[in-house]
Amino acid sequence: MMQPDPTQIAEVGAWIATGLGAGMWIWMFVKERDPIRRVRLNDCGVVLVFSAILTRVVIDGRPLDPFDWAFLILSPLFIAAALWRLARTQGMGR
């Protein structure tokens, strides 16, 4: 029995997080009508997608190009803003 590589586990987890985040964005645009819940779904999607992108950039193993550096600098800002807004809207809505 082979042991799974931690890099492969991280990559699969990143793709799962990307799918969940994209699903939250689609649900927000298509189904959700409550404005607070829409904001919260958007913020959860931002946290999942940007975290997954950061994970994939870090585990890639190739030299970073300017696009990767932009993600490394901007992603934590978007994640922090989304988490702050999630904390501020906790308990609101229906």
Image (tube, rainbow, N blue to C red):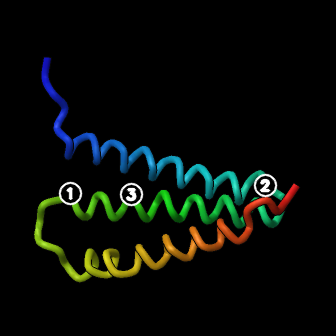
Q: Residue at x 51, y 62 (%)?
A: 47
Residue reaching furthest top? Answer: 1
Tell me if mark 2 has few (under 14), some (14-19) or many (20+) residues whose alpha carbon lies within 10 angstroms of its own: some
Q: Residue at x 84, y 58 (%)?
A: 33
According to the image, label 3 marks what residue?
A: 52
According to the image, label 1 marks what residue?
A: 59
Task: Find residue 72 and report its horizontal and vertical position in percent.
Answer: 31, 75
Cα distance in 3D space between marks 2 and 1: 35 Å
Amino acid type at circle 1 is: Ile
Which sits earlier in the primary sequence, circle 3 or circle 1? 3
Task: Find residue 61 and report its horizontal and vertical position in percent.
Answer: 13, 60
Q: Is residue 13 above or below residue 18?
A: above
Tell me if mark 3 has few (under 14), some (14-19) or many (20+) residues whose alpha carbon lies within 10 angstroms of its own: many
Q: Quadrant of residue 38?
A: bottom right
Amino acid type at circle 3 is: Ala
Position of residue 40 in the picture relative to residue 93 (left or right): left
